[in-house]
Image (cartoon, rainbow, N blue to C red):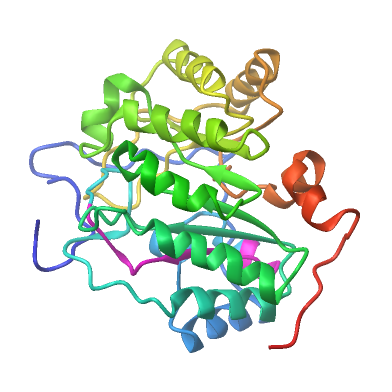
Amino acid sequence: MPFTPTRDRVDPQTLNTTPLRRPEWIRVRAPAGETYQWVQSLMRSKALHTVCEEAMCPNLGECWGAGTATFLMMGDICTRSCGFCDIKRGRPEALDWLEPERIAQAVKAMKLQHAVITSVNRDDRPDGGAPIFAMVIRRIRQVLPGCSIEVLIPDFKGSLEALKIVMDARPEILNHNVETVPRLFKLVQPQDRYEWAAATLSNAKKLDPQVLTKSGIMVGLGETMEEVKAVMRDQRSWGVDILTIGQYLQPSKKHLPIARYYTPEEFAELKEYGLSIGFKWVESAPLVRSSYHAAEQVRALSIIHRQLYGDLDDPQTVSD
């Protein structure tokens, strides 16, 4: 593992990573506006990271402009080197156990209806950092009752013990992205295992049948449509309720190249197929990412949210 964190994933000298020209249906909104600037200032003031910035999410401008964000916990350095990801890889620093409090206070300040919490991989820890997830779920519920919570977790190397720590805090949505098809796992995410993803999602449902489980797939890395549909069938067999499918966008020439752009019609075909095999909700479009329309998903589908808050429509801030 490198001592100096880096965003580089591949060597352009050994792999042709020349970006493909973007088609007309790929249009990314540039970040701007007062709300965007306020969110940026809030994150800086609380020393927080967001996956929106660290992973160069194409929806950053839209989400921050609407006052929403996906919080990135456990630092901004990942122990894995996925070829699609722009988050730095290297040796991470020690966990910051005050981070859940800062995130909860940021969620409260933003008056979020739905908070999405994710993290880098922390393979340096046997528990993968699972206690941090549990802490932030519980603290957000204390300071902003009514705010639904989605956690986008690592695979914890398939650890049932680590997963149980998170599940005991009862998030409304437990999300883990498969990302790609089994044939491309070693190329796309060399330290991950398809069976770890399967264990994470299927065990989450076993630990709490009422949790909404969610997963995502990127397309455009060289997979076939039939391979994508095969993964979708696997995800349904693991009990996954919600599926997101989006186009892979190459962060730089030192990341995996785009094999091709899927058309809007192909995304529509995948959505129709997903609904036909039993997913409760499918978001499938070029710029769809994990947290896309997540608040609507919770309020339409979550048993846990209704148990906690009944018909409460808006989060209620609580004084410390």
- In the image, taking residue 182 as reference, residue 211 lies left or right, namely right
Residue extending farthest to the right is 311
Q: Which residues are magenta?
A: 63-79
Quarter of the picture containing the C terminus is: bottom right
In the image, residue 315 sits, relative to residue 119, either above or below, namely: below
Q: 96 or 117, which is in the foreground?
A: 96
In the image, residue 294 sits, relative to residue 204, either above or below, namely: below
In the image, residue 292 sits, relative to residue 105, either above or below, namely: above
Q: 279 or 12, which is in the foreground?
A: 279
- In the image, taking residue 259 as reference, residue 39 lies left or right, namely right
Q: Position of residue 273 (x, y in %)?
A: 64, 15
Q: 302 or 169, which is in the foreground?
A: 169
Residue under the image location 75 percent in, 68 percent down? 145
Residue under the image location 82 percent in, 49 percent down? 306
- In the image, taking residue 307 as reference, residue 223 lies left or right, namely left
User: Toward which corner of the image does residue 73 lie, by quadrant?
Assistant: bottom left
Residue under the image location 23 percent in, 72 percent down? 93
User: Toward which corner of the image does residue 157 lie, by quadrant?
Assistant: top left
